[in-house]
Image (cartoon, grey):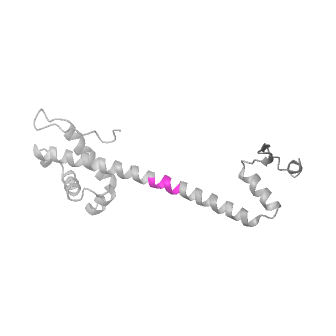
């Protein structure tokens, strides 16, 4: 009743013969601790809250980066397979200079990002993306039955 009079209504119950007050709201807890002079405990509670929040944010960032890396590795693998397929049947040599240059750069540095390949070749990132998409598309479609068929997923597929 006194807590309610102070603007801090709290549910309570008996546990092992003793009254226990339960708050789930951090705001109620911090207000109560501030009013009773529990500044040291209040600081500890806030430090734990900040640490928990930072851990959560760090985990989200790590998970996102891990997923991005996995997608990049899978895409590079598909691209290398497509380049090999086009090279083996001679269709890569028939492609424009930019496509051939991007394919060669991907082969030389399979771990490179599209931005790194673009910087190396002095191209826009979108030009590198288009060239690699073209390589994958061409490898997916036989040219009149000539050469072997590439078995990877098309770019952007699940």
Q: Quadrant of the C terminus?
A: top left
Q: Is residue 149 above or below residue 33?
A: above
Q: Relative to 92, is 77 on the left or the right? A: right
x, y percent for residue 58:
50, 57
Q: From which residue to which does the magenta span run?
A: 57-62
x, y percent for residue 62:
45, 55
Q: Quadrant of residue 145?
A: top left
Q: Residue furthest front?
A: 16
Query: At x 86% / y 48%, what residue is drawn?
Result: 4
Q: Residue furthest bottom?
A: 40
Query: At x 29% / y 53%, what residue is drawn?
Result: 128
Of residues 11 and 81, which is closer to you in this image? 11
Q: Quadrant of residue 78?
A: top left
x, y percent for residue 35:
82, 60
**Predominant SS of the magenta segment:** helix
Q: Is residue 19 above or below residue 158?
A: below
Q: Relative to 87, is 60 on the left or the right? A: right
Of residues 54 and 106, which is closer to you in this image? 54
Query: At x 25% / y 61%, what residue is drawn?
Result: 121
Query: At x 24% / y 44%, what residue is drawn?
Result: 134
Q: Is residue 106 above or below residue 10?
A: below
Magenta region includes residue 65: no
x, y percent for residue 31:
78, 57
Q: Residue furthest top?
A: 144
Magenta region includes residue 61: yes
Of residues 76 and 100, which is closer to you in this image? 76
């Amino acid at each position: 009743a006194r807590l309610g009079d102070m603007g801090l209504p709290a549910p309570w119950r008996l546990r092992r013969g003793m009254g226990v007050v339960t708050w789930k709201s951090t705001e109620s807890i911090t207000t109560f601790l501030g009013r009773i002079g529990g500044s040291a405990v209040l600081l500890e509670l806030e430090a734990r809250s900040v640490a928990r929040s930072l851990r959560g944010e760090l985990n989200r960032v790590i998970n996102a980066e891990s997923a991005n890396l996995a997608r990049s590795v899978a895409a590079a693998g598909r691209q290398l397979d497509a380049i090999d397929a086009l090279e083996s049947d001679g269709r890569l040599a028939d492609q424009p200079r930019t496509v051939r240059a991007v394919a060669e750069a991907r082969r030389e540095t399979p771990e490179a990002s599209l931005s790194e390949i673009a910087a190396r070749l002095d191209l826009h990132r979108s030009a590198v993306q288009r060239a690699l998409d073209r390589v994958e598309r061409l490898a997916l479609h036989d040219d009149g039955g000539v050469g072997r068929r590439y078995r990877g997923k098309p770019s952007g597929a699940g």
